[in-house]
Amino acid sequence: MVVGMKYAINTDFGYHDIPLGGRLDLIRDAGFSAVFCGWGKPGDVKAVQKEVEAHGLYLNSVHAPFTNIHHMWDEKLSAAELDRQLACLKETAECGIPVMVCHAWIGFEPEKPTQTGVESFRVLLQEAAKLGVKIALENTEGEGYLRVLFDQLKGESALGFCLDTGHEYCYNYAKDLLAEYGPLTYIHVNDNLGITGNSIFWLDDAHLIPYDGIVDFDRVARRLAKLGFTDTLTCEMTTASKPGRNTHDIYADLSCEEYLARVMTAMKRLGDMVEKYSSN
């Protein structure tokens, strides 16, 4: 039985006209107990953590930089990207944050995993084990890279999995990725409209509020319950449509308070379902 489910959200979901401190107050008042943030340069997480804690919340993960994560697989570029990931990991550990979410790949080129990439991630995972941080690899595009890492690095104690519920539907053909890459370390809850074109592309990664798209959250809840999930349900939201899309127009007239209330209602609906199936 799930008792007292807790909920978290990303700090950078929108409403940037409101200072971070103001958004954190609204996040707390909406019923969230935790947040997560990204890392861009040394000092970023420490600064956010200080403000987060001042507003009665806590950081439950750090999202590592991902725009150049494909460089981890390139013999000429891997060293610089590994250094960037290690710098993020170091600050995550210094802040006492238990999880760093990391992409295995970014891009839509034909998949060509390399041993360079495997060894780069091995170094990252081994350092994470020393620092007491779990690296939760997230399902994104390029699932072949994720598969190779789990196949070849399954013995690394710091290796974990982050399920992104939306990515399952717009990048991974709605496959049950928990069955392939579990156990679960972390979760990003969000919704979308699936693969809308003839091929997988990032424009479909909408990050809608749960139940505003096509993701089967009953199925999500049943799988979480089967795992005995009792951790914080964390959503990854945005109020912005992707270029050329109008998916988020439904939120355009909402104040930040109204938007967060709608997110929390959806998250509690999912949490209640997990509790229901956990008790069966």
Image (spheres, helix red, strand yellow):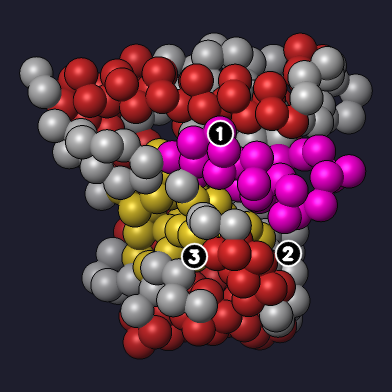
Residue, disc 1: 30
Q: How far apart are marks 2 and 1 (CA)?
A: 34 Å
Mark before the other along the chain sequence, 2 or 3: 2
Q: Mark 3 or mark 1, which is nearer to you?
A: 1
Residue, disc 2: 68
- State yes or no: residue 267 in magenta: no
Is label 2 in a helix, a strand or a loop? loop
Q: Mark 2 or mark 1, which is nearer to you?
A: 1
- Which amino acid lies under the numbered mark 3 shown in the image of this protein? Met
Q: Which of 95 and 40 is in front in this view?
A: 95
Mark before the other along the chain sequence, 3 or 1: 1
Residue plotted at (24% across, 42% down)? 230
Report crowding for label 3: few under 14, some 14 to 19, many 20 or more residues within 10 A (C-alpha): many
Q: How far apart are marks 2 and 3 (CA)?
A: 16 Å
Residue plotted at (27% across, 37% down)? 4
Task: Name the spot of residue 94 as percent of width and height, x first.
Answer: 50, 84
Report crowding for label 2: few under 14, some 14 to 19, many 20 or more residues within 10 A (C-alpha): some
Q: Give the range drawn in magenta.
A: 7-32
Report crowding for label 1: few under 14, some 14 to 19, many 20 or more residues within 10 A (C-alpha): some
The N terminus: image quadrant: top left
In the visual, does 192 lie left or right of 127? right
Residue plotted at (9% across, 18% down)? 280
